[in-house]
Amino acid sequence: MCAAVCPVIVSRAEWGAQPPKSAIALKVPVDHVIIHHTDGATSDSKEGCSRVIRQIQKYHVETKKWDDIGYNFVVGGDGRIYEGRGWKTLGSQAKGYNSKSIGISFMGNYNKSEPSAAMLAAAKNLIDYGVLMKYISSSHEIHGHKNVKCTDCPGASLPFPYVFFFSIGIGLPNLAVKSFHRNNNSTPTMIFYAFFSLSLFVALEAACPEIVGRAQWGAKAVKPQAMAVPVSHVFIHHTVGATCNSKETCSKVARNTQNDHINNRKWADIGYSFLVGGDGRIYEGRGWKAVGAHTYGYNSKAIGISFMGNYDKVAPSAAMLNAAKNLIDCGVEKKFITANRQIHGHRDTKCTACPGAALYNIIQKWTGFKGGKLPGYKC
Ligand SMILES: [Zn+2]
Ligand SMILES: [Zn+2]
């Protein structure tokens, strides 16, 4: 039912919510989305995020005396969305706007550091999904909490609200504009935010995930063989090797994979076009414009994306799956991949288990998936 990328929403039952003391229906579609940060603990697992959100609910109900957790949704540090009051219940998150907005809060404090690419993509997908389902109007406005109240929320480093402030935030009542000026009253700051907003706007529009470049992960330099783009096939693989949970450890996995492919397989370079790290980042392999060594018969007409790890029995994390889907959308947007692209598993061209049964089950639901034995299939 969702357009390109469905948000992964962890329901109240799944995170162990207490029932609300009372609930008032929210009249949808709403015209506003308000962005917050929780200004508290975060986590990178479903279990940890569930614990954090139970604590937030306890604080909002017992200390703040609200009927339930205040937000409509919380974006976990793991890149999943946690259901708060949901789409159809009035929130307690932005005074004056509760009956006409959806409040989305990023778990953690974003005064000094930015949320991960996976968290930003999850929030954006959630909003897109809300529009598609008519919970949010298609002409909606997105604001930071600080645009409607004098607060630091959602933190100076959270780019999301600024992206939209200069184009639509000016439509807010006087209070909002005044509070924005009070917090950022110097001209250089305003100009900085203007440029910052524009560059991020472009990045988010293209739905591109964070890509760790070859220089960043310490790749050996090689001479690429140019590939004609756009290509119309995308192949999904798994590395059947180590995985990782940080930029440092995933960079090491990328270097080890490149060494294995060059030294043992005698290839010119790491075989894949891109790798998906266990940390939810994308690692550049041969990139968009070079012929790969990942799928026999299709290397000069496909992008090969490999998930670090073994996905025969377990599925990759939501952050990894979102990163891969965003990478494909980004490739289409930038015209490296055709809009009518076909997505396949490696096993569709060869008798191999790759990309693992668990991952193959998931990609079968992706837009453009085409399975079965492709032309040239060989054992
Ligand atoms: Zn807030
Ligand atoms: Zn493979």
Image (spheres, grey):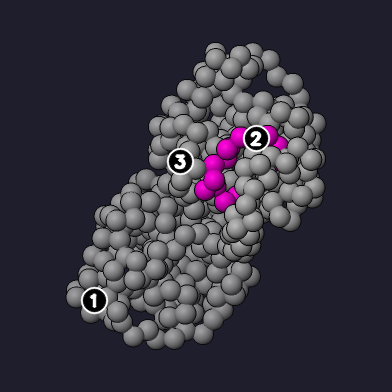
| Residue 338 horizontal/vertical position (percent) | 60, 74
Relative placement, left or right, of 206 versus 295 is right
The outermost residue toward the front is: 186
Q: Which mark is residue 150?
A: 2
* Amino acid type, callout 2: Cys
Quadrant in the rendering for residue 32: top right
**Who's the residue at 62% across and 26% down the image?**
70
Of the pair 14 and 66, the residue shown nearer to us: 66
Give the amino acid at mark 1.
Answer: Ile
Q: Residues within 10 Å of mark 3 (few under 14, many from 20)?
A: many
Q: Residue at x 74, y 21 (%)?
A: 24
**Is residue 330 toward the left or the right of residue 86 in the image?**
left
Q: Which one is in front, 253 or 143? A: 143
Q: Residues within 10 Å of mark 2 (few under 14, many from 20)?
A: some
- Check disc 1 and report the residue beneath it: 262
Question: Tag 2, which secondary structure?
Answer: loop
